[in-house]
Amino acid sequence: MRVFWILFTAEWRHFKAARGLVLLTSLVLLVGLYGIYYGTTEIGRQRQHLAELPALAHHNVEELKTKFPEPADAGEIGYYHTTFAVHHPTPWASLSLGQRDVNPYYVKLRLLGLQGQLYASENVNPAKVLSGNFDLAFVLVYLFPLLIIALSFNLLSSEKEQGILPLLLAQPVSAALVVGAKLAFRLALVLGLALVLSGVAMLWARVPLDGRVGLWLALVMLYCLFWFGLAFLVTGLQRNSAFNAVALVGLWLVLVVLVPGLLNVYVSAARPVPQGIELTVKQREEIHGGWDKPKTETMNRFFALYPQWRDTTTIKEHFVWRWYYAFQHLGDQSVQPLAVAYTDGLRQRYELVNRLNWLSPAINAQTSLNALAGTDLPTHLAFQRSATRYHDTLRAFYYPYLFRQVAFTHADYAKEPTHTFTSSSEISTTIRGLGKLLVSLGVVYAAGLLLFRARPINPR
Amino acid sequence: MTYILEAKDLRKQYPDKLALQGLNLQIEAGEVFCLLGQNGAGKSTTINLFLGFVQPTAGAAYINGLEVASNALRIKQYLAYIPENVMLYPHLTGLENLALFSSLAGFKYKESELLAYLAQAGLPVEAVQRRVGTYSKGMRQKVGIAIAVAKHAKVLLLDEPTSGLDPKASNEFSELLRQLSQQGTAVFMATHDIFRAKEVGTRVGIMREGELVDVRPTALLNANELEQLYLHYMH
């Protein structure tokens, strides 16, 4: 232990003397802090938008009260009244934005057909989407491995190339202890950095102090250990520093760029998802076609779904709102199989990626962190289901006014249901991710140990 | 009798070359054994086998009665090594390098003691606090000597240790070896320098193509005779 500590502290002195590495480590620290700022700012912006929505809805109600000062037809109100289905983030979302930048975090809803509204969202800058999020998870998953490579590519080759190793190993010090102390120092440095950044991010985001803190730290720690394991494995080949650097950067490219790219292509081909435009066109055709269909046919189809309204007054007028909303809803019903196929397809793709993410610990870590932060696809789909249920509730609220032909008074606005949905962490996905990382870790370290055992270190 | 350093039928076969063929050698405490031979004769391989840096194909090397191959770590408590070209951590000073290597060897010296070892090795006082990156080869060699001396080893393994030293420093090193030998340290030195071998050695061995072809006590030869003997084997 004494010798280990001597080697460990010596590594600190070597590190301090290597200005390039000090600079790089400082840069990663700054980049990590920027990632925290980026994530918290983005979630802060989303929270601010969500906080403004009740005021917007209230303003809309006030406008309607002015427009309709007397009790009015609920159909008119349902047509003009805007309400919102809102998706509140967990505090963890600041650390790992996941899909919160591409999927809408609120849906503006009227009493019209749902499907046309569910996918309507603000335009986002496609160039920004292409570049992705620069949150803490990005820094940890994609940039930390590069820092680990820069710190560890010459783990032993440096001493060998400088000619120090023979003198070092002529002391009563085993090569394994030298490698172990070097790895331990780098590990302490990188994990310390990851811990500081995670701690700052958690404090800034005010995450609740529960088991998820441990899960986040365990994921980050195992992921960093995996990359150190790769450095250990490559060191075991006992090649020169240039070879080690090229091999490790090559592995980074394979695991962080190539495998995710290929996996994306494979998953897209293996789990085709119906085009969203197909769904939109079909729904619009159905709704627009509704104007030309006999009202009796439309209403009979609607009453088959909602027999409780069958005994309401027969429609004789050219236009009535309950008929209008009936064919709006039938438009939704007509694309229901497509909508289900679309969300099922997305879920199947997600599940396939989750099954295959052992191929790339980077994907595994990213999906696990997103699941922990509640910013992954299943969370978004859960929000969509919640928004759909909310739309059903809205319809259920308005239908008695429409079918019983009850006038909508100013007091009724306050009775309208509201919606809220808050992400929750997918702990089981995170724990599965941890398990896979542990297996990856076991494989690389076992391979490294076998290599060192098969080829004892030659100091020359 | 337990020899400080011993080789029994020690053999090293590389894929393309037989580097050492059946070396048998015993060196006692206080003895200075100088191994002469051309480049590639097997001198460095012999040292590497005693250091445990390479594994023998057959036979065994012993340090202080312990087989090197199966006691790789323990035997290093008993030996010190000075390579032909001592390389140290360039960003540390000579003093810091000596402190680091001594602490790895299990010695914790005061600064005054470290300075004394460096002075004994002949390193100028003004250089001890300078980064080793600014040192000449000879100065690094002197720090290497200080590291070896500070280890108080039973065996000194030296591979062309005076390479890079000026004649004065070489003489001082020879004197140091004599002192250590008188204190009971066994010295095994691979060298090309016949005159240095004659000067400090108690025995001299000549190695050719991995074989120890002759061993003589230096007391029975003068420098010229040793040179003639060496040349005889080299032709």
Image: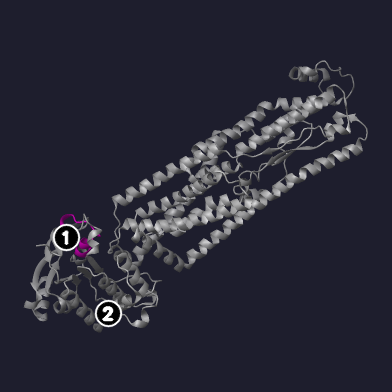
User: For the residue carrying disc 1, how many other residues have a C-alpha within 10 Å: few (<14), some (14-19), or many (20+)?
Assistant: many
Quadrant of the frame with the C terminus of chain B: bottom left
**Placement of A348 over or under B107, stated as above or below:** above
Q: Which residues are magenta?
A: B46-62
In the picture, residue B173 is in which quadrant? bottom left
Residue extending furthest left?
B220
Quadrant of the frame with the N terminus of chain B: bottom left
**Labels 1, 2: front one:** 2
The structure residue drawn at horizontal position 42% and vertical position 45%, both measured from the top left corner, is A441
Residue placed most toward the observer, A119 or A178: A178
Residue under circle 2?
B120
Residue placed most toward the observer, A291 or A163: A163
Residue extending furthest bottom?
B168
Q: Amino acid at mark 1?
A: Tyr
**Placement of A255 over or under B227, stated as above or below:** above
Residue under circle 1?
B62
Query: Does residue A378 appear in the picture of this structure?
Result: yes
Does residue B189 appear to the left or right of B103 in the view shown? left
Residue extending furthest right?
A70
Q: Name the subunit of mark 1.
A: B
* Mark 1, secondary structure of its residue: strand
Q: CA distance from mark 1 to mark 2?
A: 30 Å
The structure residue drawn at horizontal position 59% and vertical position 53%, both measured from the top left corner, is A201
